[in-house]
Image: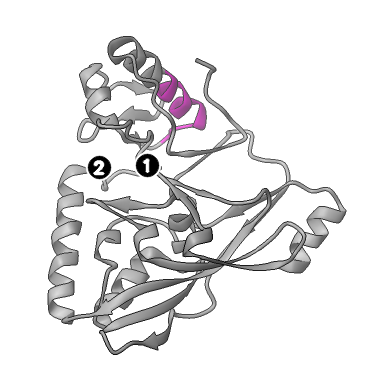
């Protein structure tokens, strides 16, 4: 990684960090530059087991969340259940401070190890991590390599049952049977983006191959032939209508590469 970053800097090549791309919308024109795709070379490592049943688990940024949840079940580790059904990698979850049902990844993160744009390795403890709502403050060009999670030992069957309960709850409320880039907009303080979009009577509205989900209005589904421009059109429509109806300007949760929303 250090060599790749040095090459991109010396040659002045823009670089983009890609995990599994589950919350990403890329321009139909693509992006010009170097795309660095993070994967994981091995399973998570249990670094410490404490007397009070606490466990420190170290995970590489490219490790898929689905496999991490399964690892927790197989090893009797509590604390990962809320990640069930969230797509992507743990690195992406850190970058977005992913969460559900009242918990966020910051709640179980002890430290992150990153590499700066100059190739310097950095270890950031809990007090140094700038987590916010669906954000993590990183320096320009900084890349997450791995991190440590604080979990606890528990009964594998109980952990599996809780994971299944949350997975079932997500499956019944979200359109997981259709391709999408997840929740499109952040929830504004004290409200839900999906409720505001539904209130604006936008459920089911379609543009090209993209459609605002009839199941959960904060998802835009790919009906088969959707283009980025179709999704952007619907995102702009949502922001305009919701602002007109509720006076709230929704902020995107989806990351945009090579494209942008209209200024409002």
Q: Main secondary structure of the magenta part?
A: helix
| Quarter that holds the N terminus | bottom right
Q: Position of residue 240 (x, y in %)?
A: 39, 14
Instruction: Find the residue positioned furthest to the right.
Output: 10
The structure residue drawn at horizontal position 33% and vertical position 23%, both measured from the top left corner, is 206
Q: Nearer the viewer, residue 236 or 80?
A: 80
Left or right side of 204 for 128: right
Disc 1 crowd rating (10 Å Cα; few below 14, some 14-19, many 20+) is many
Q: Position of residue 225 (x, y in %)?
A: 43, 34
The structure residue drawn at horizontal position 40% and vertical position 23%, both measured from the top left corner, is 234
In the depicted structure, whether residue 80 falls above or below residue 247? below
Instruction: Find the residue positioned furthest to the front.
Output: 127
The structure residue drawn at horizontal position 37% and vertical position 55%, both measured from the top left corner, is 87
Q: Which residue is mark 2?
A: 175
**What range is drawn magenta here?**
225-236
Quarter assignment of residue 158:
bottom left
- Is the Cβ of the residue at disc 2 closer than 8 Å to that at disc 1? yes
Q: CA distance from mark 2 to mark 1?
A: 8 Å
Disc 2 crowd rating (10 Å Cα; few below 14, some 14-19, many 20+) is some
Q: Nearer the viewer, residue 197 or 47?
A: 47
In the depicted structure, whether residue 118 falls above or below residue 186? below
The structure residue drawn at horizontal position 13% and vertical position 78%, both measured from the top left corner, is 157
* Disc 2 element: loop
Quarter assignment of residue 30:
top right
Q: Which residue is mark 1?
A: 180
In the depicted structure, whether residue 5 falls above or below residue 223? below
Q: Position of residue 39 (x, y in %)?
A: 54, 67
* Disc 1 element: loop
């Amino acid at each position: 990684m250090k060599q790749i970053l040095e090459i991109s800097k010396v040659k002045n090549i823009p670089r983009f960090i890609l995990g599994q791309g589950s919350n990403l919308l890329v321009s139909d024109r693509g992006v010009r530059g170097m795309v660095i795709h993070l994967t994981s070379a091995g399973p998570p490592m249990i670094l410490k087991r404490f007397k009070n049943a606490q466990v420190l688990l170290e995970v590489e940024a490219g490790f898929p969340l689905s496999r991490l949840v399964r690892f927790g079940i197989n090893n009797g580790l509590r604390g990962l259940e809320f990640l069930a059904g969230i797509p992507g990698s743990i690195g992406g979850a850190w970058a977005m401070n992913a969460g559900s049902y009242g918990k966020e990844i910051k709640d179980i993160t002890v430290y992150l190890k990153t590499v700066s744009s100059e190739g310097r390795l950095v270890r950031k403890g809990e007090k140094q991590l700038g987590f916010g709502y669906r954000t993590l403050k990183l320096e320009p060009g900084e890349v997450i390599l791995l991190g440590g999670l604080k979990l606890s030992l528990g009964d594998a069957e109980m952990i599996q049952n809780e994971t299944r309960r949350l997975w079932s709850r997500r499956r019944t409320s979200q359109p997981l049977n259709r391709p999408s880039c997840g929740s499109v907009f952040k929830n504004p303080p004290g409200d839900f983006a999906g409720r505001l979009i539904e209130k604006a009577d936008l459920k089911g509205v379609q543009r090209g191959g993209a459609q605002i989900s009839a199941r959960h209005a904060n998802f835009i589904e790919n009906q088969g032939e959707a283009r980025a421009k179709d999704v952007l059109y619907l995102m702009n429509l949502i922001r305009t209508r919701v602002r007109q109806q509720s006076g709230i300007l929704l902020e995107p949760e989806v990351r945009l590469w090579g494209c942008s929303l209209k200024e409002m």
